[in-house]
């Protein structure tokens, strides 16, 4: 009986336990159903929000954006959480139903606690690659500008490059304001493109485009077929408010940087070893000049100079340097009162310039260009750098031929140059000239045609017979416009020069401390009084439209300009079969479109030196072009010659003049005391 009672009691207890468990299961099931129903409502609202392009889709530059949440343990780097909505509003250990209720209030009803919104919180935005790169340009100037005047102590902005995330640690209202300001900034993004074939016949490496983008504060990419280069930048609207219209935009700046570095050039460059023994062994020496002295494209390369050891293993000095006997073009002396291209001509005064420009009429009657081409010769001294890695392996001169080369000018100490000038017999009789010149370079626009039908046919003929996809070289000459500067003010036009031919002879002197580069230019100059040059309509347009601030080093110019140029200065017009009558004669002017190709601000001091002109220059070509100093020698006319006309010499005199100038340059280059800083003995 007792056993039966115990058994019945056990069955009753088990039944009660089963009923209690069933009730709990039923309650849990009902709560789960309610949670699912509420969650379905939340997801339906979330889908409606997506359909209305709410939040993230409101900003096209945003890939992912987390809602603002108060700071907490979840804000630490590496924290693993995806439910940002309820962080700070409910404990992480709360019941799922409580979390869902808070989540619905936050996401569907947009409810928040004012005390939390007024404290520090965290917002994270993942930005599109293009827009993120633009924020990074210019030492992150856009990010700095965004937070300027808004962030209080403890608030900050953080950028994570690997994930392209911008993190704002601010109050909720301030985060909304900053995101709105950032959106207004991205509304000013401009994109323009140009064909690659205008510059070269192959695509650009990504490293090249990235370097140009860094210099210009842009984002650059090539289209998938590599036929075009797309340039994107943040446009500053205040430029129009300051009257800066009609000038280069950053698409033009990128184009001219690539054109100057990789475009086709007319310069004929020859490498001379000055009779150096090709069997003598030498080494490649790197890091001889600072990167800031080089153009932007050469800063990316490893450049070395080839040098012989000071003495051989047996103690004998290196081989004696031979004399270079000829250059690419004949050496012509220039009158002592001029330099070419670019003469120290009288210039128009600022007051007269202000009177001339507003009253001038366009077009002015054609001015006179020099009929006969002149040839200038300038010898510069520095390092002939080769694109090679430094090596301990012994090489010969022949081993470094055929490499990419660049000539980097260097100078002795100015005191050493002063000693040279004081020892010259004629130095005390001549004045030392000190001048500042702003040189503007214009290249024929790639692909642009002239208004001359005959030259159009000539260009089309060239197109049909050139290699496929090879960049088109316009037949128009290069132009140099020189503006005289004094006390940071533009005085006026100094000269306008058309350059038809350039020859560069680079002389390797591995046994000396420096090399030599002879630059020869065949040119014609526009002859006119300074005020007439300023009135001529192409120059007038440049002077009116340009923004020149010498004191701050800010220079902006129109991207394109048309210049009327005589037919005889166009490429290949010197051929015997060129049909001059068909184009109106050799002196007929025909317009060609030019692209602004860069500038140089040159501060120069010059004085006579051994029947030549010795010039010490400080050159500023901008962030992309580099900044350097250089010293050069230029042959001048014998004493007694007058006027700017070509100096006439017989064959013997010309031969003697040629040998004397080359001998002077060789002696100047191999004066080790001059270039090493010791006492001069030249």
Image (cartoon, rainbow, N blue to C red):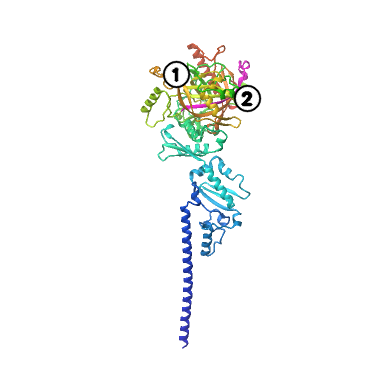
**Relative to 551, does residue 173 appear above or below in the rendering?**
below
- What is the x, y in percent for residue 199? 44, 32
Q: Nearer the viewer, residue 268 or 286?
A: 268
Nearer to us of marks 1 and 2 is 1
Q: Nearer the viewer, residue 305 or 138?
A: 138
- What is the x, y in percent for residue 479? 49, 24
SS at badge 2: helix
- What is the x, y in percent for residue 246? 52, 32
At horizontal 49% and vertical 11% (from top left) the residue drawn is 652
Q: Is residue 427 magenta?
A: yes
**Relative to 327, does residue 69 appear above or below in the rendering?**
below
Q: Are marks 1 and 2 in contact (CB under 8 Å)?
A: no
Name which of mark 1 and mark 2 comes first in the sequence: 2
Q: Which residues are magenta?
A: 420-444
Judging by the rendered image, the residue that carries numbered circle 2 is 415
Residue 165 can be seen in this image? yes
- What is the x, y in percent for residue 439? 54, 26
Judging by the rendered image, the residue that carries numbered circle 1 is 588
Marks 1 and 2 sit apart, C-alpha to C-alpha, by 50 Å
């Amino acid at each position: 009986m007792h056993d039966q009672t115990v058994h019945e009691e056990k069955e009753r207890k088990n039944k009660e336990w089963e009923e209690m468990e069933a009730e709990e299961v039923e309650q849990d099931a009902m709560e789960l159903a309610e949670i699912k129903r509420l969650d379905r409502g939340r997801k339906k609202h979330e889908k409606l929000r997506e359909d209305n392009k709410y939040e993230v889709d409101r900003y096209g530059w945003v890939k992912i954006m987390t809602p603002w949440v108060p700071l907490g343990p979840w804000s630490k780097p590496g924290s693993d959480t995806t439910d940002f909505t309820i962080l700070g509003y409910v404990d992480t250990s709360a019941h799922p139903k409580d979390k869902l209720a808070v989540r619905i209030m936050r996401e569907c009803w947009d409810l928040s606690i004012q005390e939390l919104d007024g404290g520090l919180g965290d917002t994270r935005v993942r930005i599109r690659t293009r827009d993120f790169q633009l924020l990074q340009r210019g030492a992150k100037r856009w990010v700095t500008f965004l937070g300027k005047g808004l962030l209080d102590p403890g608030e900050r902005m953080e950028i994570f490059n690997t994930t392209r995330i911008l993190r704002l640690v601010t109050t909720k209202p301030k985060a909304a304001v900053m995101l709105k300001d950032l959106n207004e900034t991205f509304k000013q993004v401009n994109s323009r493109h140009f064909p690659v074939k205008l510059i070269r016949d192959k695509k650009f490496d990504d490293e090249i485009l990235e370097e140009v983008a860094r210099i210009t504060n842009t984002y650059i990419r090539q289209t998938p077929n590599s036929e075009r280069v797309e340039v994107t930048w943040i446009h500053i609207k205040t430029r129009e408010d300051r009257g800066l219209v009609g000038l280069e935009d950053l698409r033009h700046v990128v184009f001219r940087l690539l054109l100057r570095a990789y475009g086709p050039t007319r310069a004929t460059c020859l490498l001379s070893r000055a009779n150096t023994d090709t069997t003598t062994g030498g080494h490649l020496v790197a890091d001889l000049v600072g990167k800031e002295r080089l153009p932007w494209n050469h800063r990316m390369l490893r450049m070395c100079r080839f040098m012989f050891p000071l003495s051989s293993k047996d103690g004998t000095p290196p081989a004696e340097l031979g004399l270079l006997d000829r250059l690419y073009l004949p050496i012509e002396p220039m009158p002592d009162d001029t330099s070419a291209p670019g003469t120290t001509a009288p210039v128009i005064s600022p007051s007269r310039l202000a009177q001339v420009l507003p009253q001038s009429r366009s077009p002015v009657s054609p001015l006179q260009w020099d009929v006969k081409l002149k040839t200038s010769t300038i010898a510069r001294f520095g390092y002939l750098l080769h694109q090679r890695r430094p090596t301990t392996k012994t090489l010969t001169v022949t081993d470094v031929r055929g490499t990419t080369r660049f000539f980097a000018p260097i100078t002795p100490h100015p005191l050493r140059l002063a000693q040279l000038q004081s020892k010259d017999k004629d130095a005390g009789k001549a004045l030392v000239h000190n001048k500042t010149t702003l040189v503007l370079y214009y290249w024929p626009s790639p692909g642009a045609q002239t208004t001359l039908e005959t030259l159009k046919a000539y260009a089309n003929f060239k197109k049909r017979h050139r290699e496929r996809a090879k960049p088109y070289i316009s037949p128009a000459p290069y132009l140099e416009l020189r503006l005289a500067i004094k006390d940071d003010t533009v005085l006026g036009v100094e000269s306008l020069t058309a350059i038809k031919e350039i020859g560069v002879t680079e002389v390797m002197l591995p046994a000396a401390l420096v090399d030599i580069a002879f630059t020869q230019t065949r040119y014609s100059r526009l002859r006119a009084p300074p005020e007439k040059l300023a009135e001529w309509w192409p120059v007038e347009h440049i002077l009116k439209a340009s923004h020149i601030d010498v004191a701050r080093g800010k220079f902006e110019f129109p991207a394109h300009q048309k210049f009327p140029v005589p037919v005889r200065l166009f490429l290949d017009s010197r051929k015997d079969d060129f049909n001059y009558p068909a184009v109106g004669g050799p002196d007929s002017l025909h317009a060609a479109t030019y692209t602004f190709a860069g500038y140089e601000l040159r501060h120069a001091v010059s004085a006579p030196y051994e029947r030549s002109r010795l010039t010490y220059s400080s050159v500023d070509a901008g962030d992309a072009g580099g900044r350097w100093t250089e010293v050069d020698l230029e042959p001048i006319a014998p004493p007694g010659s007058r006027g700017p006309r070509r100096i006439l010499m017989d064959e013997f005199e010309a031969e003697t003049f040629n040998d004397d100038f080359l001998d002077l340059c060789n002696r100047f280059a191999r004066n080790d005391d001059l270039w090493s800083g010791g006492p001069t003995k030249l």
